Image (cartoon, rainbow, N blue to C red):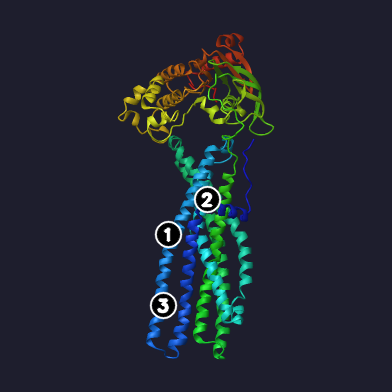
Amino acid sequence: MSPSIAPAESSEHALRRVARLLRPYRMQALLLSFAAAAGIGAELLAPFLIQHIVDDVVSPRGSLRTLALLVAGFLAARVLIATLEVCRGWVSVWLGGRVAADLRGRLHSRLQHAPLRFFRQWTVGTLMSRIIADAGRLEEFVANTVPVLAVNLLMLTAILVYLFHTSWRLSLWALVPVPFIVIAASTLWDRLKVRLDKQASTWAALSSHLIESLNGIRVIKAFTQERREAERFDDRNRRVMEATIAAERRSFALFSVVYFLMNVGVFFAWYVGGRQVIAGGLRVGVLMAVIAYLWMFYWPLQWLGQVAGSAGQAVLGAQRVFEVLDVSPEAYDDPRAVVMPHVMGRVSFRRVTFAYESGAPVLHEVDFEAHPGEMIGIVGRSGAGKTTLINLICRFDDVSAGAIEIDGVDIRNIRLSDLRAHIGVVAQDPFLFSGTIAENIRIGRPTATFDEVVEAAMVANAHAFIVAKSDAYDTDIGENGRRLSGGERQRIAIARAILRNPRILILDEATSQVDGPNEAAIQQAITRLAKNRTTFVVAHRLRTIRNADRIFVVDAGRIVESGTHQTLMARCGLYHRFVTTQRTMRPIVPWGTLET
């Protein structure tokens, strides 16, 4: 099954959802609106004062006292405008940053709770683009575009009232280009939106490639592929450049057309208003105020193209953000789930069939029961379904047919946090987080004391190498434990599982990538860890499961053989062939032919 990914929303719906995100910040929005309204009033006062300076002081040669008062009023208006602009800027920047931070938090939380099948459909670069770039577009929209748009709408309304009150004929001539502007903007915007979407997708591809290239730097250097990687990066970088240029060209075309059409209205105003002044129907100061107000009216409209571009990118960002937020999370909070704080560890597969994609089953009617405290070895060719089988126990995926039970309860009915609390996993290549050794071991149980951490490390045969380091348990291991050897990372992962103290233990090729001495130490730790637990061991080195209570041989999604090592060897079947082949190939290729 593929993850449930919501289709792209309409622009209107996406913006309504963004508005709902702003509801917790109503007070800040009101403060922003007040500052904007006051700033508009101060802005509109300036041309009005100019009108009176020209008509009541300069032309009739009025008193210096009146001139001084009007100029002082003009200066006060400018000071008020600057003060309110600073206040508005502070509030809008805080509001945009807060909304973006909340969005990033929600996105990260949703990704943490999304099912693993979701991550098979998305690259890391794409998801990073959602959290960083798309949330950033919304921040820009909230902090800059929305306040500017609100301010300009207030200004346009006030100016229109003044213009029609002063001269409705002059106003009608000045507004002649507006219908053409609306038509041009709507036509060019559809083309711009396509380019913006293309630009966003190329950025996501570039981010994904960069992450992959940095993670694989050892392989690149080992196989001298620096030139090839540089060429691949340059290709993706060129696509970003081309998509960005195409989007900017569309935006520039939209802006230029709108700018030209707006100036046509100013030309009409000068001609029609000038004739009225000559005929004596309009005073010079009034005409100058009208022209000033027209420039103030056209100034926000001149930026219509850029506002449309910013709003368009915000809409695309919102659509992409909500695409992730709408993914159905795992059922952590299902009120119908069975609470199981304690389990015995009996695991039962009841004719389990599973397919990642419809019509292509990976497992076919798998049926067995593992008893509490029993060790089950699992072997098979690459792609046989071994890892899928153990992933189903953890409920990383849900079965397509049949059922998996723990202590007789279908795991789909068990509270998910309880289910996974009873399962410990040690992977072939365990992931460690940046931080100290102690912090990584504590992931198994964050509330554990330091003495408990040390005890777990001792059981995992890790204490000796830890205390030999300069900072012991406070040693910073670097990204994914890169400052540790493979065997050291593996033993820390085992200590992490020991600290968790699970009833069900899953070991996925836990010793396949370490050398002999490390393997012996890890094998001793695993033996201690598996004691009195139901244990599933996906084996690559078959000698690690010789003493398992039962061994399942998986082939083409079915358990084709089952029994002890001695029983299976006596049958001379597929398991016998695997063991014989591995003995033969080990001197040449130590990792053999069996992989998960």
- Is 9 rendered above or below residue 124? below
**Sequence order check: which comes first, mark 2 or mark 3?**
3
Picture coordinates of residue 543, whole percent (x, y): 50, 15
Evaluate whether residue 279 shows in this view.
yes
- Is 189 rendered above or below residue 385? below
Where disc 3 sits, the SS reads: helix
Residue drawn 61% across the image and 82% down it:
169
Mark 3 or 1: the one toward you: 3
Q: Dot 3: within a 10 Å radius of its alpha carbon, few (fewer than 14), some, or many (20 or more) residues?
A: some
Where disc 2 sits, the SS reads: helix
Evaluate whether residue 206 shows in this view.
no
Label annotation for residue 176 = none
Which residue is label 1 attached to? 90
Picture coordinates of residue 443, whole percent (x, y): 44, 30
Q: Amino acid at mark 1?
A: Trp
Q: Amino acid at mark 2?
A: Asp
Which residue is label 2 attached to? 134
